[in-house]
Each structure stands twice: as C-alpha cells, then as structure tokens.
Image (cartoon, helix red, strand yellow):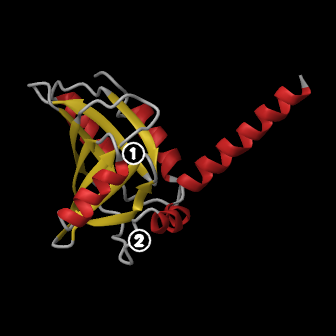
Amino acid sequence: MKKMLKVLQTLAIALIMSVTLWGNPWMVSPAAAQFGCDTPYVPLLRENGWVIRMNVPDQEEAMDFYGNIMGLTCNPTFFSPDFWAEFYSEDDPDTSIGLSSNPYEPFEPKTVTTQIVPDLAAACINLKQNGVPITDSEYVGFGVCLASFQDFFGNELAYRQEKWNSPQEPEFLCERIIYEECSPGF
C-alpha cells in the first residue's frame, strides 16, 4: 500500500511539473531547440490571423516536411514535443499551420481552420446570436483559449484568442469567457 501511495505521489508531482512547464512558453523554448524548433525569432502573441490545425501521425516527420521541404519556420512559442508544433511563413507570420499529434491515441485525419480574434467573448456572442452553436471551448495552454463550432456544411472551425489585455492570468480569463459567453450550445 505504501509503495502504491509513493507511485501516486510521484505521478502527481510529475503531472504538476509538466503542466507548469508546458503552460509557460519561456520554459518550452529550450526543449523546442532540442527537438528542431530553435528559431531565434519568436512572433509576439497575435490579435489577428489564422491557424490551420492538421492532425499528423508522426510529429517529427511532419516537422521535417513543413520545415525543411516547405521552408516554413517553427514557432517555439507554440511548441510542445510530441503534441503540437506550429509553423509560419516569414512573409506572413500571422498565418500558421499547427501540427497536432497525439502518440497515445489512434491517428485520425482532421483539419480545423482557426481564426485568431482579439475578443473571443464577442466572437462567441456573435455566433450564438446568429444561430451557430459552440461545440466545445477550452483553455489549451500557452495563453490560448479556443471556441470550436461548425459552418452550415459541417466543416470544423474555431476562434482563438492569444493576446490578453489584462494583467490576470489567461487561463482564468479563458475559463470566465467559456462559462459566460463561449459555453457549448446556444
């Protein structure tokens, strides 16, 4: 019993450390350099732009394709080894491709277009007023809050807020927005 309790304590500490480290982009950047996302230029958090999320079965292979073959630049601000890597063109740093992978789940092809907005709450209110339900909303770390929805044809879309005009923590602000304006449904 004591051995099991020790294992659970160790797992809890590891989880807390992982969340703390992954939640701070400045802590992720050194790891990014180790895994091939060592760009010296890091764009500031954006108020506008687009992110095209694409599921990939192998992050390293996908990073090689988008970085070396297509010539895009990896953004270490939004990099989490094995789960997320974001690439942009230096000609258009407000538009990026996010490579989403999860080695713990079976691969399923999926593409989601995400618009970066300066006010996620207002964007959600507008959707709901126009009869478009929010399908999911969440804080995904790195200061990013998402609200997902579908167009009238079933295509998956999302709104994303990265830049916050408040001294409060982005996670706290995101949770408030999710609860008040971006909760799933109408």
Name the residue at the left extreme.
Answer: 153
Pick the front one: 29 or 177: 29
Give above or below for 42 relative to 11.
Answer: below
Label 1, label 2: how far apart the Cα atoms are = 25 Å
CA neighbours of label 2 inside 10 A, class few (<14), some (14 to 19), many (20+): some
Mark carried by residue 145: 1
**Residue type, mark 1 in image:** Cys
Quadrant (top left, top right, bottom left, bottom right) of the C terminus = top left
Quarter where residue 88 is shown: bottom left
Disc nearest the viewer among 1 and 2 = 2
Quadrant (top left, top right, bottom left, bottom right) of the N terminus = top right
- The local secondary structure at tag 1 comes to strand
Q: Residue at x 19, y 26 (%)?
A: 132
Q: Residue at x 20, y 68 (%)?
A: 71
Q: Residue at x 37, y 59 (%)?
A: 163
Q: Where residue 60 sits: x, y (%)?
A: 36, 53
Pick the front one: 159 or 166: 159
Mark carried by residue 38: 2
Q: Residue at x 77, y 40 (%)?
A: 10
Q: Where residue 31 sits: x, y (%)?
A: 52, 63
Left or right placement of residue 84 versus residue 18 in this view: left
| Residue 139 appears in view | yes
Q: Where residue 9 sits: x, y (%)?
A: 79, 36
In primary-sequence order, the first of circles 1 and 2 is 2
Left or right placement of residue 179 versus residue 1 in this view: left
CA neighbours of label 1 inside 10 A, class few (<14), some (14 to 19), many (20+): many
